[in-house]
Amino acid sequence: MNLLRFFPPALMLGSILLAAPGGAAPQTIKPGETWPDDRGRHVQAHGGGIIKLGDTYFWFGEDRSEDNDPGKRYVACYSSKDLAHWTFRNQVIKLSDPENFGPKWVLERPKVFYNEKTKKFVMYMHIDGPSPTSDPRNGYALARVGIATCDTVDGDYQYLKSFRPLGLESRDIGQFIDDDGSAYLVFESRPKRGFYIARLSDDYLDVEKEVCFIRSPLEGGAIVHYDGLYYAIGSRLTGWAPNANKYATAPSLSGPWTEFQDIAPPETKTYGSQSTMMIKVAGAKATTVIFMADIWKPKTQWDSRYLWMPLEIGGGKLWLPEPRPWTLDMETGEARIVE
Ligand code: DGJ
């Protein structure tokens, strides 16, 4: 088994253990399988993001339900206390083309931030579509972010505006909230062949300051702060097709960042998935970092799956173990592979 592959025992995860069969186990997370919500329907939160309020996690993502109105774009919100059982809360966005972007307009990768000062929930989304001034075959020419806000976490979000962050083309977005609560947008910028980490304004309604530009053409940007180091994961630019996702580390968000390295055997193409976020769960005994990724099914998007796995992480190394069913103990923070 590969848990020890790159890790001397001292570095070994602290968090991934092998579970004995039987026993009162928490709910199993099954990478790649359908993930039923409390209604028994497959969770629709693709390209998603998660925030934690009190002891509750809220998962937002693209709702690609087959019966959605094809003219609208949807974002769904789910809640959970254990990251395994998800309760459907609301389709928080049910939006008709808000700025005459055209019938092929795109809303992807929604991320919600809670602003303590304004008490508003602020959603960022990748807004795109063909541009009247570019090749109509390019469905991602607008390259903007949109913002919607709400007074409650799972209410109906009101669309406010779209713009190019820092005046730059922006496609895939990621969110990062540091341990001190500061909020960052991660966005891929193709003309620059890299991605930005940028700080949000005080009210979160703007992208204020470039913190770092990482010159590596990667999207699906995800960042975690673990044991004194920042780890960033991204995927190469291959559309819906999976590729070998990579990671780099830095002592500070502003860098310097190491070279990017594979997070999994490259021939597996990240086990058919693409990064969207990392979540850190700190318990009484261990801190587990979960890799959240999408297994896209571009022709049947509603059936796209999720690959969530605890990462092997520490000392500047990061590795995605081969996906297997696992459980997470929210008290101890320990992840267990189900044998
Ligand atoms: C890869 C991105 O990560 C997805 O969110 C989506 O934009 C696809 N490209 C579209 O091809």
Image (spheres, rainbow, N blue to C red):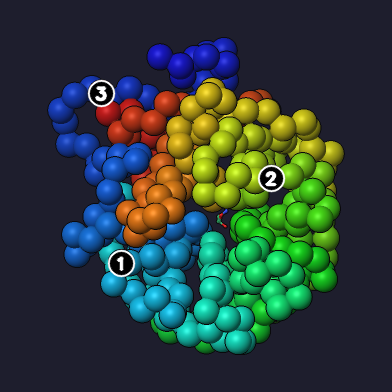
Crowd band around label 3 with a 10 angstrom C-alpha radius: few (<14), some (14–19), many (20+):
few
Q: Report the front residue among 30 and 299.
A: 299
Residue drawn at x 32%, y 54% is 303
At label 1, which amino acid type do we have?
Glu
Q: Quadrant of the C terminus?
A: top left
- Is label 2 within 8 A of ligand 1 (CB to nearest ligand atom)? no
Nearer the observer, 168 or 222:
168
Using the image, determine if residue 135 lies above or below residue 153: above
Q: Residues within 10 Å of mark 2 (few under 14, many from 20)?
A: many
Q: Which residue is mark 3?
A: 339
Q: Which residue is the site of mark 1?
A: 66
Residue at label 2? 218
**Left or right relative to 330: residue 47:** right
Rendered position, 156 above or below 13 = below
- Indicate the position of residue 321 as horizontal and vertical percent values: 46, 26
Tell whether 132 sits left or right of 286: right
Q: What separation in Å lies between label 2 and label 1 (alpha carbons)?
A: 29 Å
Residue pictured at 79% horizontal, 37% vertical: 257
Amino acid at dot 3: Glu
User: Is residue 250 visible in this depiction of the protein?
Assistant: yes
| Residue type pointed to by label 2 | Leu
- SS for tag 1? loop
User: Who comes first in sequence, dot 3 or dot 1?
Assistant: 1
